[in-house]
Amino acid sequence: MHTRFTLAVLSLILLAGLAGCAPEPAVPEAAAVPVQTDTPRPIIPTATFTLIPPTETPAPTPTRTLLPPVEKVRDIAYIPGGASQQVLDLYLPSDGAGPFPAVLLLHGGGGSKRDLESLAASLARQGYVAASLNFREHPRYPYPAAVEDAFCGLAWLYANAETYHLDPQRFYALGHSFGGTLASMLGVVDDPALFLSGCPNGLPESDRVRGVVAYTGLFDYVHLPSAGGLFDYASGYLGSTRATAPALWAQASPLNWIDGSEPPFLIIHGEADRSIPIDQSQAFAAALQAAGVQAELMLIPDANHFEIINSQVTLEAALDFLDGLVNQ
């Protein structure tokens, strides 16, 4: 793996915002989530993170031995008869009988499960079953549709564990951008029943995922500055304004669910990201660490919002993180 330097990152919080507007969503009657006001985010402890130094030399050749090409099963409906978006692709190891650890992959907003095909294949070659999920998105499907689909996709893995030789004790979530937000919700929400409306399968109440990798996610809608692209995006996704629905904005923010019971997190952010400010990841990592959760923040110099997902550095980091959890 790469040389790591542990630093202290000041928790600071300023954001920019994103676009849209949609009809008032049907929202689950959630357990109480702390509702915060339109004020600057309170100061929280600093997060410990790993900085990958820039280099002018090519990335080192991976030391992992790749297995033969993986088997792919396309467009499985995780809700039979559901919307066209409610499908997933499975990437299966070609070697071994299992049971295999599984990783649920969640793409960025406006993207597709095919965006993570290279990552899914890499995971399968290392002995994981990767399930790359499509989900419903706004403006046609505002919150909580995408969150519900993430939970229902995970429930499908549990229901089909025997068929595909999966180990339910070793399920993980990984997401990029908006997918990082969804993956984080799988790790922080206390009661999965809140987001299983219309799902034919259930989930265990605890330990649903044993670890989360979040690339450049948006973790706190409550403290977004009240202007700009990210704020407009949040308003569209949530089908409301913060002033009219503050509890909804709090419920949709992974940061507001943290209570210390979360699984380990690896949070990765590019320092050149111009889509989602780095302080979203810094604040989320700091809040997890302050609650006693195992959480690492990795900052990648010169990496932008999209380069980071196909980086050999971040692939190795994600594999090292997951391997460490699998082998515990």
Image: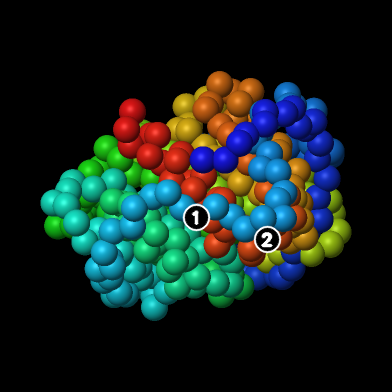
Name the foreground residue: 15 vs 296: 296
Query: Disc 1 marks which residue?
Result: 61
Q: Please give the name of the residue rendered at 74% of the width and 68% of the height, measured from the top-left corner.
A: 19
Q: Give the mark toward the camera: 1 or 2.
A: 1
Q: Eyeballing the image, is 64 above or below 41?
A: below
Asked if residue 44 can be seen in this view, the reply is yes
Image coordinates of residue 132 in percent, x first then y, are 39, 63
Image coordinates of residue 46 in percent, x first then y, are 73, 27
Q: Quadrant of residue 13?
A: top right
Color style of the picture: rainbow
Q: Which mark is residue 88?
A: none
Q: Quadrant of residue 114?
A: bottom left
Kindly give the residue lying farthest to the front in the view shown: 57
Q: Looking at the figure, which quarter contains the C terminus? A: top left
Q: Are marks 1 and 2 in contact (CB under 8 Å)?
A: no
Query: Disc 2 marks which residue?
Result: 305
Image coordinates of residue 251 in percent, x first then y, are 59, 45
Image coordinates of residue 198 in percent, x first then y, are 35, 60
Q: Please give the name of the residue rendered at 75% of the width and 43% of the height, measured from the top-left corner.
A: 279
Name the foreground residue: 161 vs 22: 161
Tell me the amino acid under the disc marked 1. Thr
Residue 39 lies left or right of residue 59; in this view the side is right
